Every structure is written in C-alpha cells, then in structure tokens.
Amino acid sequence: MLYIIILGIVAAIVGAVCGTQLQKRHFQQEIQQAKAAADQLQQKAEEDAKEKSIKILSDGKQQTEDYKESIEEELESYKADNVTRQSRIDQRQTGLKQTEERLDQLHQKLAGESHEINEQKDGIEKLHQTADDLTKKRMQTLQERGSISLDEAKQQILDQLATDLKREKDIELKYQDDEAQVSAPKVAKILADDAIQRGPVDMPREHIEHSVQINDNNTKQKLIGREASNIRYIETLTGTDLVFDPDDPHLLHVVTQDPLRREVAKTVITNLVVTKQINAQSIERQVETARLDLMNELRRTGEKVVGSLHIGWMHPDLLKIVGRLKYRTSYGQNVLNHSIEVADISGMLAAELGLNVKIAKRAGLLHDIGKAIDREVDGTHVELGVKIAETYDEDPQVINSIASHHGDVDVTTPIAHLVAAGDSISGGRPGARSESVEEYVNRLKSLERIASSKQGVKESYAIQAGREIRIVVDPKKLDDEQNQKLANEVKDEIENELTYPGKIKVTSIRDFKAVAYVGAEKKKNHKRLKKA
C-alpha cells in the first residue's frame, strides 16, 4: 500500500516535471513567434516612416517653392505700385510747379490792376469833389437869381408833395370805400354761409323734465308724510311746489319758474325715493347735498365750456353763471348750446376778417349771460348781461357786444356786428328753436284762412307742420291760368302777413272730372214693364 502511494507520488512528480518542461517549451515558442512578429512590425514601421518622411520632405519642398513664388509675385506687385506712385508724385510736383508759376503771374497781374484801380479811385474822388463844388456854386447861383433860399425851396416841394399825396389818398380811399360797399354784401354772404356750414351742430333737443315718477305706494306715503308734513318741508327748503298729477297718481310735478330750484328739488326727491329714508334730518341733508352738487356742476360746466373754446382765464364766479345757462332755454333752444354756437360762429368770422378771435368767442359766449339770472333779478337779459360783464371787468368790446346784439345801443366795435350775426344764425336756422302750441295752431289757421278767403277755393289744408298749404279750387269757376294766379296771390299774402320759419310750399290743385252713365234709365224702365 505504501509502495503504491510512493509510486503515485513519483508519478505525480514526474508528470509535473514533464508538464513544466512542455509548458516552458510552449512559452519559448510563443516568445520566438512574438519576436518574429515584432521584427516584422518594426521593419514595416521603418518602411512606413521612411515613405512618410520622403513624402513630407517632398511636400515641404513644394510648399516652400509655392510660398517663394507667391512672395516673389507680391514683391513684383509692390515694385510696380511703387513705380506708379513715384510717377504720380512726379506728376503732382510738376503740377504744383506749374500752379506756382501761374499764381506768381496772377499776383503780378493783380498788383498791376490794383495800382490802376487806385489811380482810377483817386480820379473819381477828384471828380466827386469837383461835382460838389459845382453843385454848391449852382445852388448859390439859383438862390441869387430866384430870390429864394434852399430851405424855402425844400419846404415848397414838401408842401406840394403832401398835397399830392393827400389827393391820391382821398381818391384811393374813395375807391376802396366804393369797392367795399359793392362787394360787402357778397363777401358777407360768403362768410355767413361758411360759418353756418362749419359752426352750428344739430344736437338732440334737450327736454327738461318737470316731474318725478314714484311707483312704490309705500315710498309715496313716506314722501308725503303724516298730514303732508314731509312734502311740505321739501317745498319749504327748495322753494318749489310739488303736485301729484290727477291723471297719474304716481307722477309728481315740480312747479317753479327757477330752473335751479327745480333741479335741486328733483335731485332731492329722486335720492329720497332711492334711499327710502325720509324724515326731516334726511330731507335737510339731501337738500344741502343737492345744492352743493349743483354748484359744483355749474362750475365744472363753465370750466369745460371755457376750456373747449380757448378764450383764456375767466373769474370763477362768472364760470358758475355760465354754467347756469345749461338749465335755461329760449324758444325750446338750450341757451348754453346757443351761446357756444354763437361763440364758434363769431370766432370763425373774426378769423376770416383778421380780428381778435379770442375776444370774438368770449363776446359770443357771454352775449346772453343775462338770461342766467333774469328770473331772479329785474331787468332785461341785455341790461343784466352788461352789469355782469362790467362787474367782472370784461373787455369793452365784449360789453358792447352784449349791449348791442339786439339793437338796444349803437355798435362801437366790429366784434359786436359778428356777435349779432352769429346770434341771428344760431337762433334763426331751421330746427334751432320751436314755437308754442298756441302759436303753431294759430299759424296753421292763418294759412288756411288766407287760402280759403280767395274766390273759387273749395277747400284748403295746412300740412307737413305748416310747411305746405294745399288748395283745392272749383274747376268750373277757375281755369288753369286763374289757378296759377291764385297760387301766386296766396304766396304773396302769406309772405306779407305771417312770420314763418323756413319755406312754405303753396300747391293749388284744379281737378276737373266728367262723369256720364250709359243705359241706366232704359234698364230701370225695362224692369218696371216686366213687373207690370
């Protein structure tokens, strides 16, 4: 057993030695192969390096030759440029030398001419001196022979010249005056047409409400109060009369001639209806607030109008008076809008005539300022307007325009004529103002009365709010020629007797109809015979 173990150990040792030798031999073979491969790689690398070095050297030589050629070409171009520049320099030096020679010649020529000029100047001065001496001798001789001094002769000439100029001035002024009188109507018409087209702007008619609608019965009862105490207190504080409409118990009318009081009362009632707090304290508070708001509104309105017209500074109290015109109407036309129109028209006319535009606009705006207080103070609106303008130190031209725009006083400034023209244009244009219902009805009746009074007229109708009168005549009494004559007669009588806005069309109608029946009587008789 031990023997077998020893043999196994010996066999293992021998196998290990044999394996080691075999492995060593295998490693040696691999080393030799690696050396061979390395030699091959080294040889190949040396060959590649040699080829690359040869190529690099050849490329470097080629680049060097190319660079050398380019440098030589640049040097050649530089040499050519230098030659060209040197040639130009030589040409410039030659030109400078020639210019210098010409300048020397010109200087010599100028020096000679200057000498000649000095000599001629001396000769001219001598001639002037001789002429002065001869003039003095001539004047002395004339004075000795004419027995008149020089000053007297000058005075006679000046007097004669003044007389001639005065005569020419009078002739020219007479011609200008005649020309102005002839062309004035035409120029005035052109300016008025232009002002009408550029100035007035049609605005919707402002209807001033005189009533307040109260739909809630409880609120109405609170507003009236116990034994009408609240509504009477409002009347006392606002200075108005409050009356419910008999046909509409929810419509409360504010009755007063003062538009500001009416505005305050309407504002108070409206605010009380909204808040529904109706007692003595709230009524007093609302009245005070409404008056303060109204005063602020008057001032803001005046400032806005004056600022839009560009007429300069105006006294704050006068601004409030201007604002009061917002609540004043005349023949249905709002006075503030009317005053603004007159200011615009007056300014346009003043600009066309070369007058002071700012003064013209100011006079146009203030021409009806008296209407702002004519319900509170006795006097015509013209008188009150003059007093207001004088109180606030307005320009005399503005004061004269206010005083004369209705012909109460003489016109002393051209601005007043422009304001009067603007007032007529603004108030007289169609649609600007309206007449009362009574006047309207009377005018329609007058139109029909004039037409019906003519012989041969069967019927007459005023239509289109009085802008047309239609006449139906009896064709048996009037022929076509008489019908035309009738229309002209009615037109002339309306023009002479009535005052009317715009134009009225007169239409006279003569309609003759001939009617006849055929066989009617025979048919009736035939029926009667059949019945019999």
Image: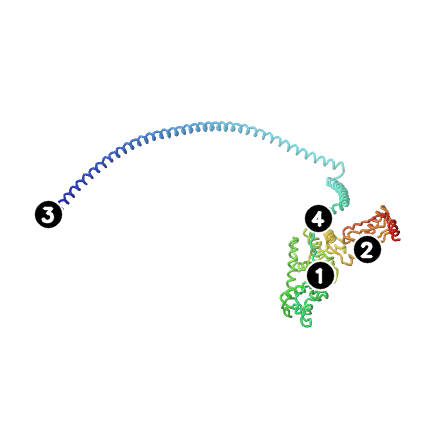
**Kind of residue indicated by mark 2:** Ser
Q: Nearer the viewer, residue 154 or 203?
A: 203
Q: Residue 412: in sight, yes or no?
A: no
What whole-number distance in Å separates the C-alpha atoms at marks 4 and 2?
33 Å
Q: Which residue is mark 4?
A: 197
- Kind of residue at disc 4: Gln
Residue located beneath label 3 in the image: 3
User: Is label 2 or label 1 in front?
Assistant: 2
Task: Report the side of 16 relative to 372 (left or right).
Answer: left
Q: CA distance from mark 4 to mark 3?
A: 151 Å
Question: Is disc 1 surrounded by few (<14), some (14 to 19) or many (20+) residues within 10 Å?
Answer: many
Give the secondary structure at mark 2: helix
Disc on res. 373: 1
Q: CA distance from mark 3 to mark 1?
A: 159 Å
Q: Disc 2 and disc 3: Cα gap in Å?
A: 174 Å
Ranked by sequence position, the earlier of labels 2 and 1 is 1
Q: Which residue is mark 2?
A: 446
Q: Is residue 192 above or below residue 295?
A: above
- Mark 4 or mark 2: whose residue is earlier in sequence: 4
